[in-house]
Image: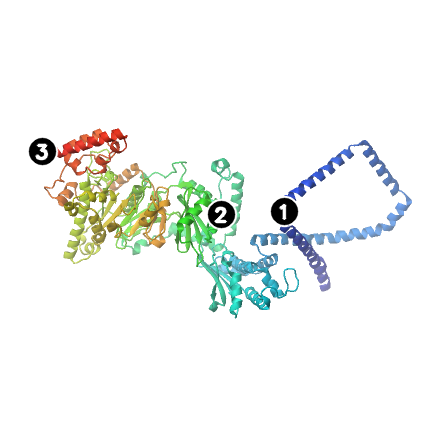
Amino acid sequence: MIKETIQMLVFQWLIPMAIMAAIYRVMYRFIYKRYERMDMDRLWGKLILGAVILGTAIGLWLYLSSSSWFMALTGYSHQGIHWFTQTGVAQVAAEQGRSLWIIIFTFILTWVPIYFRAFVLVWVTASLLVIRSIVWRVHITRTTSILVSTAVCFPYLCLKYIFGYQTPIFDFLQARLFVAKLKENVNDSYFNALQGVDEKGEKFEGGSGGSAQIQRIKAATIAIRQTKAKIRTAGGLRRAEIVVRHSRETDTDKVIESALNGVGKRIIAPSIRFQDNPVLNVSQGGYVLDSDVIYRAGDELGRWRAIFSNPWAKEQRVKNGGDGSLRAFVQVIRDVFRYVSHLTPPAIYDQIIEREKRLYTPDKTADKAKYTAQQNLDLSVIPEPKDPATGNDIPTQTKIARRVAEERIPNVTNALNAFKVNGVFDQVQVGGNSAIYRYTLPRTADLPTDFNRLQEGLERMLKTTDTPIITISANMLSVSLINGVTIPVDFRQMILQREKGLPSIITGIFGVDAMGNNVYGSLGDIIPHLMLFGATGQGKTVTIMAFLYSVMSAVDPTKLKIAYIDGKGNSFEFMRTDNSDSETYHPNPFTYAQPADASGDIEYGRGLLKYMEMETRRRIELFKKSGVSKLEGYNKKFPDKYLYEILVVVDEFSAITDLDDKLKASEVAEKGTIDTLEYLAKMGRSAGIHLLPANQTARKEKVPGKISANIGGRVSLGVSEPIESDIALPDSNIAVHLIKQPGEFYSNLNGIRNAEHGFTPYLSDDTMNALNDSLEKKFGHHDYVVTREEVMMAVYGEEDETMFDIPEPMPTRDTPLEELLELMEAYPHWAIANKSSSVIARNKEVTSADAGERRKNKLAIKGALTKCQEDIESIA
């Protein structure tokens, strides 16, 4: 029985499979050599020649088969064969050979199935191994060793999931693959030297370098053969390590170092990035390549529903810039296989835990925070955001944006590699109109010192009209590119997902990042003031309002008041609470005083700033007398005399500070605003008075150093010039002058090395009016803390010339000249006080008319001002 079993294994399995393996090896080597020498031009020539020969043969056959003489000749031959088979000689020969034919036929029926089975098993398996070896670019013998060892250890590797390993099968296979690739990277002559033969299989003689060099190469090869690799993915971290054994000789180590030079660029894997060159670590036994990268199994898995899209949708059509229905369908199939390959127990567990946290985990930020966020706004008045260009909602735009962004991953990666930035692609995020490509950098990344050249180079290589923005944070390189698909930001969702705990009273949200997480801004003890920049059209005022309404949504108006000053218009006029007879009456209970329009009422704009300085001094003096050092201590000691915090918003502050140059030397102390803003920036924190100055430019001549030096918090939208980027976000190397999309910003409020990239929501005028109405309904009507008259009285005194009436409503630069001249005649004191303001000096008809008309209009303004001065003097 045992003998028969052994014979069966040997003759029916071992020998047939060995023969088929040998035949396959011969076939593989033959094809591979032909592949190395393949010339497509010659191949096409041979195919054409073969087609001509085949066509000629077929034509000749068709001609002959249709000829009558050929048919007759064929008939005669068939008759001759039939006659021959009936002869006695033929009958005897058939009888004698019958037993031989039976033996041959029986042998074929017995062994052909066995060898066919061996053929199928060997050739199919070997072909799969060859394909895998080509993909890995590793020799087939090493590929076989890796896959066989993984298959043998598969049950053990599956068991490791129970002990917390996230990807044990990948770790085992990839570690062995790293060793194989490292060996493949070494020059083949090294291994030939070790075997004592050259590349032709002949005995290896001294040659170049002599016998000493041969011995060094042999020793180096032995050391490289003893390479060890280990990958461990657990606890949200994928750690990889390759150790190449060093020798005991310095010269041999130099050979090893030469062989391993740049090897880190060539052996990469998902979430693994080695330094370019290994580092000698004697304690670890040799030359070490290591990598530590955060790995999130749940994120790698992705969402099942996100895989599927309609291949025949309008946006998938080629004429609309899509891939076409066929390629879109193939992409869905690929994504399904990718999803299945990442469907591991840790990935499923991560997603379940994330879902549970999102749905059921209570927000405990309020337990440790000083304040708890309320929900004051009626979010139902906010319409669902839609993309104005397409009318699509957020999920639809997000799906389209992700598809567009993912198609550019190879191009972005190749462009970075061309500039020797060899990061490993981690993920792509989409938000606003941008796609952010994130790459894991090696520990010793050799990055260019000039990011401008890199950004401009990427622009050229990617053939885009918008320059990418590159940032580095926590060993991750991010490339922000215009994606061409705008994803609206939902203010409602932003408020609903905010943390309940507030580190300070003034804690707002500027927008969301590409992952949909809120980008917070908190003004308190750590960052008392914040400066915001954004060129015209970049959404600066929209960003301010989104932040302010997010602040107002969380706190009571008895704890916070907001003072508004606009240097170039009346952007905050709708916040007034004292114009009940106006059609735009939507009072806001948080408003501290009548909003100041410094473009047409510069004295009140300056006066409100001066009043804030006076309030700061008053509070500091009060704290001294009360034995406390700051507002928090005072409110805790005297809760019945609770003092609210004040946020002073100064939009286009340079339009106000620039007018300091027009003051007389004797007026600077009384009316100068630069020193006032400097004082508020230095002393306002302890008094609970915080600044939010904003400007459309960050040029040095427009941003006084006295102010910027005392305000560390910065948020910047797109600015106009490269020099402005360094002032808007100093020491960050973030080129915010490259931002083109309105509402896109960077914030340094969490540290300049952890700058946040976000997108702000858009709130229309009607929406903001409705939000004001909801706040008025919740808290009731709140009068100003101080009126305009009281501000002017306190700052300038009862008999001061600044105590004059002003036009209601305030004119703007767009006011027709004829109407402006009438207002100047009706309010002469106002006209003289604001003669340098943009409303009068830069009226639209004065600056935009043709030369002759412009000269005429300037003379009209000059004449009106002269008359106003005469009227004032006559009254006096």
What percent of the width, then of the height, locates residue 313? 48, 37
Dot 1 or dot 2: first in sequence order is 1
Label 2: few (<14), some (14–19) or many (≥20) C-alpha neighbours in 10 Å: few
What percent of the width, then of the height, locates residue 622? 15, 54
The local secondary structure at tag 2 comes to helix
Question: Which residue carries the number 2 mark?
Answer: 410
Residue 592 visible in the picture:
no
Question: Which residue carries the number 1 mark?
Answer: 39
Name the quarter where the N terminus is drawn.
bottom right
Looking at this rendering, what residue extends furthest in the right direction? 88
Q: Quadrant of residue 863?
A: top left
What percent of the width, then of the height, locates residue 182? 54, 60
Label 1: few (<14), some (14–19) or many (≥20) C-alpha neighbours in 10 Å: few
The local secondary structure at tag 3 comes to helix
Cα separation between marks 1 and 3:
101 Å
At label 3, the amino acid type is Ser
Q: Nearer the viewer, residue 720 or 436?
A: 720
Give the residue drawn at x 14%, y 36%.
Answer: 829
Question: Which residue carries the number 3 mark?
Answer: 874
What percent of the width, then of the height, locates residue 71? 81, 34
Of tags 2 and 3, which is closer to the observer?
Answer: 3
